[in-house]
Every structure is written in structure tokens, then in C-alpha cells.
Image (tube, grey):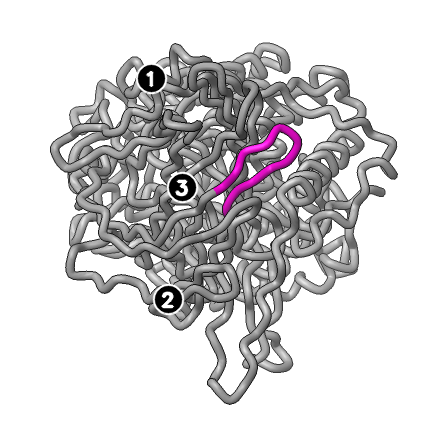
């Protein structure tokens, strides 16, 4: 069986050995008309990741609109304390006496100067690599950006795609750096980085003790320190956050352009300089741009080949599904965890970044996304590594909602994360039948059920009267609808939430199966599942309008129309009758379904918020009060298929998201959309569970459509 390439050795699979030509998804391409329209070009963003927590991001226009935009944002403070290090490269094309700025900056007064975006001939995303062409009279310049695997490095390469007779043109590139947490902006009072020329490189000493090493390929570097301010970040201004940023121009790269070779700049996060008595550690020589690009292409092809072999019965895969397969890989990261035998010695586990740019790795998001990111793409070993990593974090029957970024303790405040963990194991076993892995983790899964029955943190406990899980206390947000602004919990949902109990029933049924697999007694889990099944009937509304959202809350039963009830239909073990399943799907379709997801609250509700905009309080107040969530569309499609039996009809619900790959977070799927038409994209431009749930639903429905 083909397996995924290890993330720290990404090119050990030679695609030629797999017998697969270099076929890849069609490029996503924007021509001059869009690239030259600043509003549209700034609204479309590209995102890169290196599998170790670092990322790079920017706009098609080349301007910065977020504090998270930059060419190297890396975890300087392990395991995931990320800082913006290399902000941008401002390149100017020089041909004799002629000069063309290929960049743009938006200043505090709103001006974009220079207007380098007007020279962009085209932008395309090839697999996951952003590529620009600038047309400057008879000259055409190509630029590519990528992040090699195995280190915190970014490469920006240029070549002369079309030229004229005479001396070769050159590039003069201003290098803009900073050293700040990626969640904030730089301020004038921030200290300039310490800059040192070392053996043809430029090195910046970082606040956390590491170094940023800048190298030129096909040219030379010249130090020249100057402050660049104030740059306006339009997205942050719209979000009501600090939006004026400061960077430091640390020097220039002078490059000579050629037809037959790449030139460029690379940046590497390197360890701290040792004490003077010891020799300076060598910084590994960066591979030539052509070599690095070839390695990247081989890895992309290997990932697609693995998925194509795994999904061979569904061939040929649509190009937008293959694009999602590549996008799925961007969320997988290595995470350092303590070894049980030697806690001071970290080992490398695997986890999932919930979304770019501001999310880290969250337990709930990871488990919801795991089947789509790994099992649907043929990466079964990776799925097991993630599951085993999180098994080590289970405490008092709970899975962390959020893992630490800088070594602080994990946060245990999610009622559903541990139940999603059991569901992820069910999906893994359904795909792999890995008895040995299940036997190792079974005591951990047993502890989750035992703690939920007897009681654990935050009032999470099974009510013996009806077998349902109750949770919550004032000031806490425990379900996925977890927005909180200071002391205001927007949707507390204290009581017995419907999706939590659908997952509880699903988990009990799965545990009965697991018990048989590991030669344990399944009867206790079956009896408990039957008890919960009878109790779940309390969720059914007497008016035939689906299910209550929460039972036994502080003010009684909560009957607002929300999408949480869909899980009682989309999960493999439904606790409700077919007629009630049909009612749930009909109600959700009528009130909540949109082209890109489901509203989190029906528009007829007096608390409905149709636009996700404004400052933090206004946005978080709308987050789960009408905002459309893309990840729910996959569950709605599966629920539709359960009710109608028409896989093709259910699958068509997913098709609008194929077009969304050309918008907002280009090549990926974002987090949320406005509840009101035209449903503008909002929130995170690239979200793990959006990609994963759509990918999983499409594969499952395609198998059903083909009679699998």
C-alpha cells in the first residue's frame, strides 16, 4: 500500500518510481483585468505552509492587508509561538536607465504607491505555488514563492520569461523585516533588529535568541537599515484592530535576471549564535532554486499519486477535488510533545492547524477534520500519528480544546472534543482495521466514556434519568459555538446540546464495536446506547420542525433553529427515526442552507445577524448568530443523502465551493460567510474543517453514487 511521504523527509518518494506522470490540478489563473483592479487583487490571498507551523501569505496585488501577511512567519518560540520575520521584498526592475517598481505599499493616508499591481500580467496558483508575471514593455518577469519542507525557510525566485537584445536587466530588491508576534502590529517604539553581514549573508539577531539568515542567489546582498512606516493594513482596519504597521528595510539584494536560470532571495530561521568560545554553527547551504522547485513538485505529485491510488475506484477525480487534496496537506504539522519515558525529551507528534492565519492546533477542529484531511487522501499512517499524539493529551476524559503555543498548559474547555476523538477513531478503524492501534488506545477511549458518565470538568456529566450529557456553567463556552467577548458568552448553550448528545450516542455505539474488536464485553456500551437512544427522543419537537437545540437549560428547552441538529442525521448511527431525519433536513434546508454552507441561526430569529463585520464585539456577536459555516455543508449533504437516497443530488450541494477556490483564500476554502446575500467570505481564508468536511462528503457521496 502506498503511504504518505514523511513530512520531515518530503521527497523520499520518487514519483517516477510510482509510474505516475506529473499530472496536477488545473492552475487557478487571474489575468491582467483582475490583477490590475486593486480591490479584487487585494481581496484574493495566497497561503503557504511548511508542515512545521511556519507559513507565508499575501495578496495577489502584492500589498499587505493583514498583520499576518508576510514571507516568513515562523514558530520562534516552540512549539507554536509564531513571529513575523520577513515581511516582504520590494523589487524594482532595472534595464539601463529604465526602472519599473514591481511592488506596492498602502500608506497611512490610503495611498498605494508605487502601483506595481498595474504591471501584473497574470497571477496563477500552480498546485499550491503562487506565480506572478509582470509585463514591463518588452520584458516579462516571472516570480515564484515557495516554502521548502524540513526547515523554516522561504524562497522567492525570479527569472526573465521574455526579454530583448542587449544587457540583461536586473532587480534591486528592498528587504523588509521585523520581529514581532504575528497577532500584533509593530510600533514605532519597537527596537530595530540587530543586523550583521556574515560571509555574503545578512543575519538578524531575533528577540527570542534565534537568527534570521538572508541569502541571495544569483546576486549579492548589501546592508542598509531604514524604517518603513506607517503601512496601513486594510483588513485589520475593517476588523476594528490596530492597523498601522512598521517594518525595517535591512538591506538590498542586487540580482541579475537570466532566461535559463533562477535568481532570488531566501530567508531561514536559524538557531541562536553560540558562545564566542565555540565555533559558529554552520547554516546549511540552501539548495539552488531549480533543485528546490523540483523537490517541491515531486512532493506535490506524490501526494496526488497516493490519493489517486487510494481513490482509484472514483477516477478520474475532478480537478477541484485534487486541489482540495493538496490544500488538505497545508494544515498538517509536526508538534513537539514530551516522551512518556523521558518528559524532558520531546518527540515529534502530528497535529492539525485549525486555520490560517490566526488559529493554532485545536482538539475539536483536528478531530472533525481528520477523516477528510488524511483518510480520504490515503494518508492512513498520518491519521494514526495524529490520533496517537492527541491520546497523550486526554485528561479526566477530556481532549484539549487548544494545545499550548508557547509551553503553557493545554486548555480543557470543550464538551465535544473528546467525543469527536472517538468518532475520528471510528473513521480510522472503518478505513484501516488497525487492531493493534485500537488495542493500545482502548483504555483511553474507555476513560472518556467513564468520565462523561461519572462527571468531569465544567459540569460535564451524564444524566442517569435519560442517558443524555449535560454541560455548562455561567461564563463558559463549551460547544463549537464558542464565541466569547470579555465576560459575555454569546451562545452559552448550558444544558444538553443536541449535537453533543448525537455524538455521545455515536460514541457509545462505536465503543460497543471497539470492545468486540479488542475482545472486551460490548454489552455495557450497547445497554447505555439504548438508554441514550430512548432519552434522545426528548429532542424531537412536537410541531414537527426538527429537533430542539438544547434541553434542560436555565430557561427550559431551547428551540432556536440552528444547524447542530444535522449531526443527528449525518453521523453513521442516527438516534432519530427516518421521518424525523427528513424533518431535520427540510427545516435546515429551508432556513439555514446557503450555497457555501449553513447559517448558524435562522433569519427569522430576533437575534439573527446577517453580516459578520465591525469591531471584535460586533463580529463575535455575529459569529454563531447567523454567520454561514462552510464545514457544515458536508454534513448537510450527507444528511440529505440519508433522507433522499440520491447521492448525485446530495453531491451537487457541494459544487458551489469548487468556484470558491478562485476567491478569497485562493486554492483553499475559508471559514465563514455572511448570512445575508451575497454571502461575502469572512473569517479565516483557509480553514481545515471546511476543506476536510467538503472533501470527505464528496468522496463518500461519490462512492455511493457509483454503487460502492
Residue wearing tag 3:
173
Location of residue 293 (image quadrant) = top right
Q: In which quarter of the image is the C terminus?
A: top right
Tell me which numbered mark, 3 or 2, is placed earlier along the sequence. 3
Magenta residue check for 264:
yes
Tell me which numbered mark, 1 or 3, is placed earlier along the sequence. 3
Question: Dot 1 lies on which element?
Answer: helix
Question: Dot 3 lies on which element?
Answer: strand
Residue wearing tag 2:
206
Give the camera-side residue of 43 and 592: 43
* Residue numbers of the magenta segment: 255-265
Residue 684, image x and y in percent? Answer: 37, 37
Structural crowding at the residue carrying mark 1, measured as other residues with C-alpha within 10 Å and reported as few (<14), some (14–19) or many (≥20): some
Residue at 61% from the left image edge and 50% from the top image edge: 149
Residue 296, image x and y in percent? Answer: 66, 41
Residue 427, image x and y in percent? Answer: 66, 42
Q: In this view, does 413 lie to the left or right of 325?
A: left
Residue wearing tag 1:
591
Tell me which numbered mark, 2 or 1, is placed earlier along the sequence. 2
Residue at 49% from the left image edge and 41% from the top image edge: 255
Structural crowding at the residue carrying mark 3, measured as other residues with C-alpha within 10 Å and reported as few (<14), some (14–19) or many (≥20): many
Give the camera-side residue of 241 and 493: 241
Amino acid at each position: 500500500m502506498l503511504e504518505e511521504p514523511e513530512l520531515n523527509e518530503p521527497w523520499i518518494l520518487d514519483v517516477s518510481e510510482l509510474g505516475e506522470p506529473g499530472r496536477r490540478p488545473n492552475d487557478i489563473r487571474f489575468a491582467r483585468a483582475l490583477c490590475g483592479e486593486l480591490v479584487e487583487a487585494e481581496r484574493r490571498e495566497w497561503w503557504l505552509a511548511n508542515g512545521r507551523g511556519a507559513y507565508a501569505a499575501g495578496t495577489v496585488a502584492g500589498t499587505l492587508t493583514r498583520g499576518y501577511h508576510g514571507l516568513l512567519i515562523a514558530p520562534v518560540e516552540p512549539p507554536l509561538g509564531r513571529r513575523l520575520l520577513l515581511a516582504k521584498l520590494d523589487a524594482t526592475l532595472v534595464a539601463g536607465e529604465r526602472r519599473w517598481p514591481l511592488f506596492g505599499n498602502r500608506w497611512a493616508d490610503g495611498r498605494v504607491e508605487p502601483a506595481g499591481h498595474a504591471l501584473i500580467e497574470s497571477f496563477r496558483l500552480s498546485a499550491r505555488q503562487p506565480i506572478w508575471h509582470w509585463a514591463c514593455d518588452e520584458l516579462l518577469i516571472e516570480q515564484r514563492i515557495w516554502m521548502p519542507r524540513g526547515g523554516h525557510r522561504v524562497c522567492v525566485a525570479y527569472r526573465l520569461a521574455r526579454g530583448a537584445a542587449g544587457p540583461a536587466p536586473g532587480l534591486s530588491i528592498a528587504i523588509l523585516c521585523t520581529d514581532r508576534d504575528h497577532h500584533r502590529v509593530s510600533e514605532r517604539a519597537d527596537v530595530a533588529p540587530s543586523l550583521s553581514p556574515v560571509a555574503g549573508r545578512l543575519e538578524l539577531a531575533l528577540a527570542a535568541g534565534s537568527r534570521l539568515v538572508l541569502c541571495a542567489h544569483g546576486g549579492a546582498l548589501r546592508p542598509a537599515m531604514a524604517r518603513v512606516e506607517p503601512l496601513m493594513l486594510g483588513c485589520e482596519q475593517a476588523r476594528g484592530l490596530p492597523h498601522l504597521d512598521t517594518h525595517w528595510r535591512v538591506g538590498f539584494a542586487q540580482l541579475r535576471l537570466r532566461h535559463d536560470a533562477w535568481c532570488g532571495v531566501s530567508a531561514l530561521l536559524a538557531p541562536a549564535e553560540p558562545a564566542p568560545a565555540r565555533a559558529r554553527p554552520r547554516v546549511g547551504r540552501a539548495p539552488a532554486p531549480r533543485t528546490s522547485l523540483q523537490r517541491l513538485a515531486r512532493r506535490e505529485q506524490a501526494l496526488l499519486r497516493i490519493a489517486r491510488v487510494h481513490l482509484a475506484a472514483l477516477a478520474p477525480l475532478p480537478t477541484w477535488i485534487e486541489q482540495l487534496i493538496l490544500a488538505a496537506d497545508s494544515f498538517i504539522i509536526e508538534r513537539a510533545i514530551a516522551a512518556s519515558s523521558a518528559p524532558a525529551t520531546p518527540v515529534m507528534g502530528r497535529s492539525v492547524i485549525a486555520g490560517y492565519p490566526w488559529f493554532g492546533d485545536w482538539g475539536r477542529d483536528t478531530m472533525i477534520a481528520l477523516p477528510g484531511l488524511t483518510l480520504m487522501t490515503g494518508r492512513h499512517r498520518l491519521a494514526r500519528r495524529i490520533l496517537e499524539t492527541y491520546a497523550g493529551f486526554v485528561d479526566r476524559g477530556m481532549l484539549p480544546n487548544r494545545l499550548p503555543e508557547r509551553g503553557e498548559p493545554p486548555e480543557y474547555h470543550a464538551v465535544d472534543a473528546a467525543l469527536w476523538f472517538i468518532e475520528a477513531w471510528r473513521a480510522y478503524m472503518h478505513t484501516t482495521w488497525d487492531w493493534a492501534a485500537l488495542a493500545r488506545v482502548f483504555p483511553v477511549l474507555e476513560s472518556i466514556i467513564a468520565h462523561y458518565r461519572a462527571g468531569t470538568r465544567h459540569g460535564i456529566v451524564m444524566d442517569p434519568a435519560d442517558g443524555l450529557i449535560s454541560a455548562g456553567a455561567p461564563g463558559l463556552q463549551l460547544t463549537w459555538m464558542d464565541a466569547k467577548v470579555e465576560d459575555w458568552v454569546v451562545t452559552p448553550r448550558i444544558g444538553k446540546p443536541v449535537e453533543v448528545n448525537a455524538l455521545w450516542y455515536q460514541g457509545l455505539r462505536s465503543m460497543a464495536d471497539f470492545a468486540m474488536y479488542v475482545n472486551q464485553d460490548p454489552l455495557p456500551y450497547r445497554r447505555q446506547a439504548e438508554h441514550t437512544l430512548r432519552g434522545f427522543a426528548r429532542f424531537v419537537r412536537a410541531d414537527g420542525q426538527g429537533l430542539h437545540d438544547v434541553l434542560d437549560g436555565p430557561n427550559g428547552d431551547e428551540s432556536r433553529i440552528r444547524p447542530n441538529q444535522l449531526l443527528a442525521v449525518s453521523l453513521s448511527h442516527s438516534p432519530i427515526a427516518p421521518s424525523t431525519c427528513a424533518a431535520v433536513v427540510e427545516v435546515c434546508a429551508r432556513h439555514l442552507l446557503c450555497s457555501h454552507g449553513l447559517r448558524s441561526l435562522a433569519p427569522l430569529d430576533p437575534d439573527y445577524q446577517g453580516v459578520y463585520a465591525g469591531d471584535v464585539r460586533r463580529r463575535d456577536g455575529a459569529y454563531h448568530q447567523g454567520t454561514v459555516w462552510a464545514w457544515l455543508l458536508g454534513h448537510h449533504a450527507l444528511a440529505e443523502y440519508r433522507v433522499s437516497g440520491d447521492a448525485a443530488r446530495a453531491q451537487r450541494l457541494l459544487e458551489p465551493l469548487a468556484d470558491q477556490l478562485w476567491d478569497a483564500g485562493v486554492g483553499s476554502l475559508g471559514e465563514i460567510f455572511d448570512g445575508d446575500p451575497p454571502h461575502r467570505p469572512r473569517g479565516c481564508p483557509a480553514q481545515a474543517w471546511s476543506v476536510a468536511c467538503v472533501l470527505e462528503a464528496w468522496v463518500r457521496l461519490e462512492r455511493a453514487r457509483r454503487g460502492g
